[in-house]
Amino acid sequence: MIPFKRVLLKLSGESLMGTKKAGIDENRLSEYAAQIKAAAALGVQMGIVIGGGNIFRGLSGASKGYDRVKGDQMGMLATCINGLALCSALQAEGVKARLLTAIRMEPIGEFFSKDKAIECMERGEVVILSGGTGSPYFTTDTGSSLRGIEIEADAMLKGTRVDGIYTADPEKDPTATKFDTITYDEIYTRGLKVMDLTATTMCKENNLPIVVFDMDTPGNLLKVLKGEKIGTYVHN
Ligand code: UDP
């Protein structure tokens, strides 16, 4: 039994860098495409939100003198570049994939609507939802919460480079321990930096569970979709 009918998968732009210092690592991209292909073969409907941090982030732009809104727009365009790359890698693997964008930019991608996204997923296409929320001052984590809720996903799968949520940053504190499950409220009270608060609150208020897992280990996406207890499950 597959516990999910439809999921929103969040991939970070930073992970797309792989071993590079910026931009897209082709090996990482094709590893992701292979994992998504295997997941799609299970019959799980998938919407994917991908970040843009490997190319541009509005906040770091602002610290270098860019106007914040224009910087964020650059960041949103960066997510579209990553979305195009992922769409192309999936199609090269024989997966039916389509890019929908939060900001109109046909023919690069079609303008997002809930109905279009669901229609495509029900036809067996993987939809890549680029451009974040379409508005500045948000992140792609918030974009994923929003899209996850809109497309009526059963869960948001947040693929990261760590294998779940820890009591402290495991890369800095060797005594940190991992949670198998945690509530949204505990994330607030412990001040854990899982996602930005806007994204966490949207999931909490709309009852969208999150699975935080290590996407950079091939095979993990399939394990999560099959209900294997890897990563951390966040719930109300
Ligand atoms: N961004 C935005 N609105 C959104 C989503 C993203 O303005 O709804 C911009 C913001 O500048 C952000 C950048 O796009 O820094 C890249 O997204 P994010 O940092 O979330 O990417 P990730 O960290 O996942 O690679």
Image (cartoon, rainbow, N blue to C red):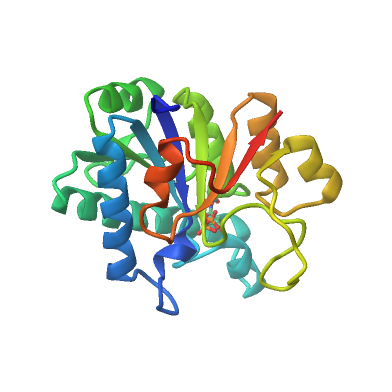
Q: Residue furthest right?
A: 189
Left or right, residue 28 beside residue 61:
left
Residue 216 visible, this orientation: yes
Q: Position of residue 142 (x, y in %)?
A: 59, 42
Q: Position of residue 104 (x, y in %)?
A: 35, 39
Q: Position of residue 200 (x, y in %)?
A: 68, 39
The quadrant in which residue 20 appears is: bottom left
Image quarter hosting the C terminus: top right
Please say if 27 is above or below 40.
Answer: below
Image quarter hosting the N terminus: top left
Instruction: Kindly identify the residue that appears in the image at 42 percent across and 44 percent down.
Output: 223
Please say if 113 is above or below 190.
Answer: above
Please say if 154 is above or below 156.
Answer: above
Instruction: Kindly identify the residue that appears in the image at 65 percent across and 38 percent down.
Output: 234
Instruction: Kindly identify the residue that appears in the image at 26 percent across and 27 percent down.
Output: 120
Q: Give whichever of 27, 218 is nearer the camera.
A: 218
Q: Position of residue 53 (x, y in %)?
A: 50, 63
The quadrant in which residue 78 appears is: bottom left
